[in-house]
Amino acid sequence: MPKRVDHAERRTEIAQALVRAAGRLGLHAVGMRDVAAEAGVSLRLVQYYFESKEKLLLFGLRHLAGRFGERVTARVRAAGDSPGPRAVIEALLMAALPVDEESRLFHHLYTSYAVLSVTDETLAAQPFIKDPDAAEITLTGLLQQAADAGLLRPGTDPHAEAVGLLAMSAGLGTSVLVGQRDAESATAVLHYQLDRIFRP
């Protein structure tokens, strides 16, 4: 009896191959033939599941966003059974810092997608590119929750601090990626900023 093909699993395997190939060659340079070679399948099979490079990129983009969500969830769970606002905020921001191979790859490809979206309307319309808005809303809500509980220093503006923390996290991530500073110093800066916002 012929083996049944799990099409969702096959598409995911191809998306994972895209992520690996793009991490090595650059998102702008990677082609469907590169992805096929990375996945160990024929070009024709990649074209069967994804009719164009654009569709492959969009699926890969969603796959990458899902992986990032899983990473954040794992960090929040590691913070304990009932983590407070600071622990959740720290998990969100640390998940985006390129402190290991997976997060370096995520930051590299996320930045590449963002740059490509400047001139590609289809990419720009994807929720993944708009995720900073969702992150800003989430972070503002967590900081407001902390303020209501008396955990923030007096005069702290939850929304302004959320915007600043996200901008700082993105900048720190890029500085680590290009070798300007190491992961330990970036993490120390992040903790310093949280200490500035939260009461001791």
Image (cartoon, grey):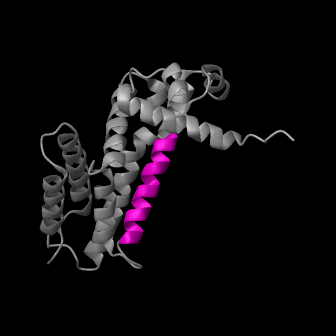
* Left or right of residue 192: residue 81: right
Q: Can residue 70 be found in the magenta stretch?
A: yes
Q: Position of residue 51 (x, y in %)?
A: 63, 22
> Looking at the figure, which quarter contains the N terminus?
top right
Q: Position of residue 111 (x, y in %)?
A: 32, 35
> Looking at the figure, which quarter contains the C terminus?
bottom left
* Left or right of residue 112: residue 158: left
In front here: 35 or 142?
35
Q: Main secondary structure of the magenta part?
A: helix
Find residue 21 and report its image quarter. top left
Q: Residue at x 37, y 36 (%)?
A: 109
* Left or right of residue 5: residue 74: left
**Which range of residues does the magenta coloring cover?**
62-78
In front here: 18 or 87?
18
* Residue at the farthest front position: 1
* Count of numbered labels shown in the rendering: 0
184 relative to 63, above or below: below
In front here: 18 or 40?
40
* Residue at the farthest right position: 1
In front here: 91 or 165?
91
148 relative to 111, above or below: below
Q: Residue at x 38, y 67 (%)?
A: 76
